[in-house]
Amino acid sequence: QVQLVESGGGLVQPGGSLRLSCAASGSIFSMVVMGWFRQAPGKQRELVARITSGDVTNYADSVKGRFTISRDNAKNTVYLQMNSLKPEDTAVYYCNAINSVRTYWGQGTQVTVSS
């Protein structure tokens, strides 16, 4: 059983930066894909970015060029570096991990972009 714990959320002004971390209780080496999703009030949860075990990355069009996902297998941690934040990035951000058996979710961390 793998547990995912997100951290790094908070309140930031437009144009600012935050780095989210997702720490796994077990090894992420077996995870085929790890990613970040977000859900704003009244909206569906959407994919923000994902990274495969081979370090192939994909991003939502809305965050390309501003967000960067990375993983550190030695630390069992996935990161989301978010730059040039906009008010529309405000949401609860969830970490996600998929192996050959099941999908795991973290509890979420709030990101609020506001002046």
Image (cartoon, rainbow, N blue to C red):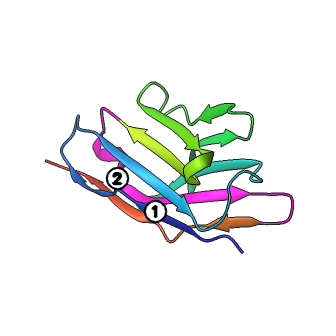
Query: Could you tell me how far apart the alpha carbons at marks 1 and 2 are, in whole angstroms?
Result: 16 Å
The answer to whether any part of residue 44 appears in the image is no
Q: What element carries label 2?
A: loop
Q: How crowded is mark 2: few (under 14 residues within 10 Å), some or many (20 or more)?
A: many
Q: Give the range drawn in magenta.
A: 83-102
Q: Is mark 1 on a helix, strand or loop?
A: strand
Specify which label sits upstream in the sequence, 1 or 2: 1
Q: Residue 108: x percent and y percent?
A: 47, 66
Q: Which mark is residue 90?
A: 2
Q: Residue 2: x percent and y percent?
A: 67, 70
Q: Residue at x 57, y 44 (%)?
A: 72
Q: Which residue is drawn at 60% across and 48% down?
A: 74
Q: In this view, does 31 lie above or below 59?
A: below
The residue wearing badge 1 is 6
Q: In this view, does 48 lie above or below 112?
A: above
Q: Which amino acid does label 1 sit on?
A: Glu
Image quarter in which the N terminus is found: bottom right
